[in-house]
Image: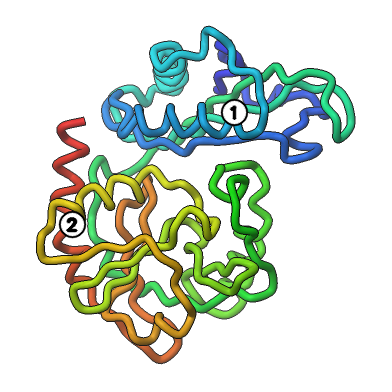
Amino acid sequence: MTNHDGILIDDTKGISFDNRGLYYGDALFETIKVVNGKIIFWEDHYFRLMSSMRILRMEIPMSFTMEFLEAEITRALTGNDLLDRSARVRLTVFRKAGGLYKPTTNDISFLISVQPLDEPFYILSEKPYEVDLYKDHFLAPGLLSNCKTNNRLVNVLGSIYAEENALQGCLLLNTDKHVVEGLSGNLFLRKGKLVKTPPLSDGPIKGVLRKQVLDLLATVEAYDVEETSISPFELQKADELFLTNVIGGILPITKYRKKSYGHELAKQLLPRLNTKVRLG
């Protein structure tokens, strides 16, 4: 069952074929974690969505309040018997059908789909996670790259490249050849007591968990934190690399080319992150 504009519909009925998200990628989405009906980091998701809708010049309905969308997410969870479990929620907002590149309206519709998750809280993966640079296509720095739009072709093709090369993931570059992010998460690099993450001006997704981890790092006196560009040459000199996203939490990268990494900082941050999840 999918929540389409507040109405639960059978997934087999689908949506119109002239959907602008399908035709032009004229859509945004939020991937949200819910634990026993509680939306994790909901305020950050909501304000990112509102900011992205403004950047894409979508008309934000007066009814699109935090309370309204929270209620609609709850309706979708209830309709799928997931209100008392952990779930992955995708909230997609797209401009209504009409026009070619130039839309006939800036009014929007939304879809909410849900899937069950096994883990209510974040755990540190002990599995190998080897990456390499994906250099076939590049991200463009700027506001559009910060938004979670439906145009994720670089991530799709990078994922295919990773599978073809027996990798667990890839790191993406922007047109200035700076390392921007992973295929499914923001990148953090630690060298000694210095922690770096690419600035939003380099083009990474404005990640909800990126913000949470930066807030946590600000409370850890042992480390200096910089939002600054990362060159590919720095990767093999680093002591630790990890990715962050709201579904998986903190994912340590174990190997890049011939360099292997530990997970000292990731291990330190994870219980603090789970405390934030518990406290809401």
Can you tell which of label 2 and label 1 is closer to the viewer? 1
**Left or right for 204, reference 56:** left
Judging from the image, what secondary structure is the residue with disc 2 in? helix
Give the color scheme: rainbow, by chain, secondary structure or one colour.
rainbow
Question: What residue sits 56% from the left and 34% below the top?
Answer: 52
Which quadrant does the N terminus fall into? top right
Foreground pick, 123 / 40: 40
Residue 80 drawn at (x, y percent)? 45, 23
In the displayed structure, 271 sits above or below 189; it is above
Q: State which quadrant residue 208 falls in.
A: top left
Q: How far is disc 2 from disc 1 in space, using C-alphas?
A: 33 Å
Residue 141 drawn at (x, y percent)? 60, 57
Q: Which residue is mark 2?
A: 269
Question: What residue sits 20% from the left and 55% below the top?
Answer: 217
**Left or right for 280, reference 140:** left
Question: What residue sits 44% from the left and 72% below the top?
Answer: 230
Which quadrant does the C terminus fall into? top left
Mark 1: amino acid: Arg
The label number, if any, that marks residue 68 in the structure image: none
Q: Which residue is mark 1?
A: 54
Whichever of callouts 2 and 1 sits on the residue coming sooner in the sequence is: 1
Mark 2: amino acid: Leu
